[in-house]
Amino acid sequence: MHLTIHRGTNQIGGSCVELRSGGTRIILDIGMPLTDEFGKKFELKRYKQYSEQELVKKGALPDVAGLYYWSNTQKVDAILISHPHLDHYGFWGYVDPYISFYTGPIARKIMQLEIMAPGGRKSVSMAINYKSGKKLKVGAFAVTPYLVDHAAYDSHALVIQAGGKTVIYSGDLRMHGHIPQATEYFLEHAPKGADALLLEGTMMGTRSDERCRSEKELETEFEAVFRKAKSIVLVYCSVQNMDRIASIYRAAKRAGRTVVTDIYGAEVFNAVWKMENQKDMANIVKAMRVFYPYSLAQMLGTRNPALLRKYAGLQIKSEEIRKRAKELVMLVRPKMVDDLTIIGEMEKADFIYSQWEGYKAEPDTARLLDFVEKKEMACHEIHTSGHADRQSLQKIVDKLRPKAIIPIHTENPKGYKEFGVPVRRLQDGEEAEV
């Protein structure tokens, strides 16, 4: 088996791994990088004037032969997406549509919902669903996905076997969310002594000694803020982070508050509830109210008017928000600053930042934070990483006992020597035999 990490050996995000064996080629993830060549947030709109071939030459798209429609070489046989975060699937819209595409069923739905959000992408309705613990055959490869705990719902680690060799791809995972038992199950049932473990190391940099707080701890902190706040509480978090949404909902319910989301959030919660029959998500959908941000409503009025009608019975308008401010927890995003200005009386609000610290440097987020500062809101930071801390990574290595670790999704590959297992450091584009 031959392995090439096309992107991810020395950076977080933009993951893309190729495995080749017995004439079959598969790709694990086709992610969009988090940062560009200047260290700033990667913005695809900066490259709109370039053709797809030029995007490859400029290093924006990974240079993978047979991945794109214009390639004359042997086509890639399949792409497997580990979870629905853009840094793991963001470039799938450029892939040759005739290449088989596999992912989890709820991950597929969440990716599909991106087409209703600003900057949405092409449909993934033809993706083939895989199931945790069920082996699937892709040419010479046998691939077994395992559900794991991560900030993205329906995240999987992948066990790949071919030619008598075994590679384990961790994807992104952790052990301090609401479903640590998923990661534990993966560690118990995945084969031990794999020839290589492709292990994410997001937390292996400056935060390597940091212990991640659990989602349950965050839930307690949310509740304390909700109880003490004298008016509306605004929370900036990802509505795709189901663990975080569950924590907020439970805390709000105990504090006697109602959760308000936008249309996109409502549709994400509905998708998870209907496909997974999750009681928490069902309760959220039934108990929440839905706010229609102006820009999103205008866009949906043209592209998907059925969604505007779908949540009309749950809609909450600015006047009601003002009247019921003391009873509400409102999930917000940077694009809603103008809407919040129209609602008014935000000087009395509490604001909770529940995202990675690095997002604060983004222009849209900076605008939201500037609005919060000008309104002199009471500010709180309640967040924990979606990735495994150093102690959890050590447990993963100890449980799986691989013959070698290959660093990926990390800015500190040198730190992997601490795990006590041989480390094979690769560079982007370097092919290695497993």
Image (cartoon, rainbow, N blue to C red):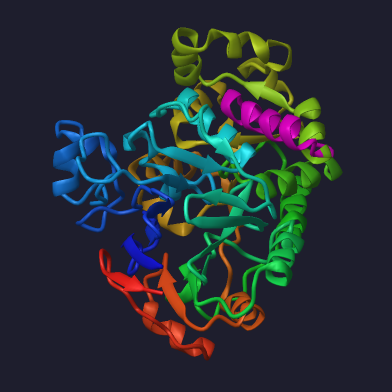
Dividing the picture into quarters, in which one does residue 3 lie? Answer: bottom left
Task: Locate residue 224, reporting x and y percent.
Answer: 76, 54
User: Depth check: 35 or 356 in front?
Assistant: 35
Residue 228 lies within the magenta run: no
Q: Is residue 408 visible?
A: yes
Name the residue located 83 percent from the left edge and 43 percent from the top edge.
255
The vertical placement of 332 against 67, above or below, is above
- Horizontally, is 246 left or right of 119 in the view? right
User: Depth check: 22 or 112 in front?
Assistant: 22
User: Depth check: 130 or 86 in front?
Assistant: 130
Task: Locate residue 184, reporting x and y percent.
Answer: 73, 68
Quadrant housing the N terminus: bottom left
Predominant SS of the magenta segment: helix
Residue 272 lies within the magenta run: yes
Dividing the picture into quarters, in which one does residue 194 lie? Answer: bottom right
Q: Is residue 328 visible?
A: no
- Horizontally, is 413 left or right of 349 in the view? left
Name the residue located 39 percent from the left edge and 49 percent from the top edge.
31
Task: Locate residue 205, reporting x and y percent.
Answer: 42, 75
- Residues in magenta? 256-278
User: Depth check: 382 or 195 in front?
Assistant: 195
The vertical placement of 272 against 380, above or below, is above
Name the residue located 49 percent from the left edge and 26 percent from the top edge.
341
Task: Locate residue 223, reporting x and y percent.
Answer: 77, 51
Quadrant housing the C terminus: bottom left
Q: How many marks?
A: 0
Name the residue located 35 percent from the left edge and 74 percent from the top edge.
433
